Each structure stands twice: as structure tokens, then as C-alpha cells.
Image (cartoon, rainbow, N blue to C red):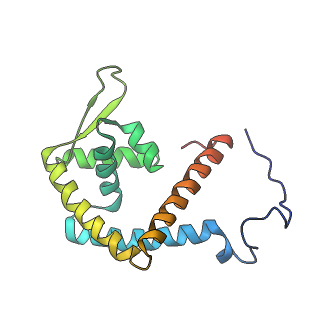
Amino acid sequence: MQVTQTRVSDQERVHPPITAITDALSFRVARFNRLIERMGGMNFQSRLGITLNEWRVIGITEALGAATVSDVRKMLVMDKGQMSRITSGLVERGYIASQPSQGDRRVITLALTEQGRALHADVLAEATLRNEYMSNCFTSEECAEFLRLLDKLTAHTLERAEAEGAAL
């Protein structure tokens, strides 16, 4: 299903006028994301020997508890091939255990190993410190409001993606 785009009148407009790509919310969010990914990726790789995407798979696997590959992939909005390569590498290195689900042998369940939980604790501590440095330009109230708005925007975007038939 394709959603038809319509023009928004000046009275209905929420976003400030866009006269260049740098004015667009999507560009600004993408640019911010690339900045923090580059900084975090270099740090995690050099200090902890793990890529940013490997950290995300480990982190989401831990956060979801008994997670399926599909659940982790959807949460990270990652394609199947990339998810498969990352998961295989983490299994080979002993950070994640994978096994077929008891309810459906076609579904693969992921869980952190003891080594994976130890790495998770180290990387989470580093991520906590990095987030504190990154957000220290805010007051605690501004940070809470920013995170609330980001959650709202993410939920709205997921609804739009589903309405437009985007495969996530």
C-alpha cells in the first residue's frame, strides 16, 4: 500500500520551511546519527575489540532476554544478511549462543554466553560514559524531553513505515 503525499498548507506546517537539504529533519537526524556512530564505532573497536553493530546485537539480545534473531533484527532495522553475518561472528567468538526454538525449529533463539555477558557489562559501562559526555550540553530536564520526543518520533515513523508497507 502506498500512501499518497499531499501538500501541507502554511497553517498546517509543523516543520520549519525547507530551503536546503540541511534544513530537513531527516537529514539532521541522519547526520547526528552518523557522527555518533563514527565516534562510538571507532571507540568500541579500538578499546573493546567489537564493532558498533556487534555491540548492538549483543545489547539488544541482552535487553530482550530470550531473543529471536528476527526480533533482534527488527529492533535494529537490520537486513537479514548483515544480521546473519554479525550473529555468526559473535557465535564463533563465543559471545552468543544460538539454538532452534523449542516451539518452532525454524526460529533461532539467541542468548548471551558468560563471555558475552562480561563483554556486555564492559561495553554498557563505556556506552553509559559516552552518553553522559554526549548529553552534557543538556540539563537533565532537556535530556528527558529530548528522549521523550525521540521516542515519539520513532513510534510515529514506525507507524508510517507500516502504513507505507516498508519491510522492516
Camera-side residue of 130 and 95: 130
Question: Residue 134 in the image: x percent, y percent?
Answer: 38, 75
Q: Identify the residue shown where x is 50% and y is 72%.
A: 32
Question: Residue 38 in the image: x percent, y percent?
Answer: 39, 72
The N terminus - image quarter: top right
Q: Is residue 106 above or below residue 62?
A: above
Question: Residue 47 in the image: x percent, y percent?
Answer: 21, 70
Residue at the limit of the structure toward the front, as seen here: 141
The quarter of the picture where residue 113 lies is top left
- In the rendered image, is residue 80 in sight? no
The C terminus - image quarter: top right
- In the rendered image, is residue 56 in sight? yes
Q: Identify the residue shown where x is 62% and y is 65%.
A: 26
Q: Identify the residue shown where x is 24% and y is 39%.
A: 111
Q: Identify the residue shown where x is 45% and y is 74%.
A: 35
Question: Residue 17 in the image: x percent, y percent?
Answer: 76, 73
Q: Is residue 119 above or below residue 108?
A: below
Side of 47 relative to 137 (left or right): left
Camera-side residue of 32 and 50: 32
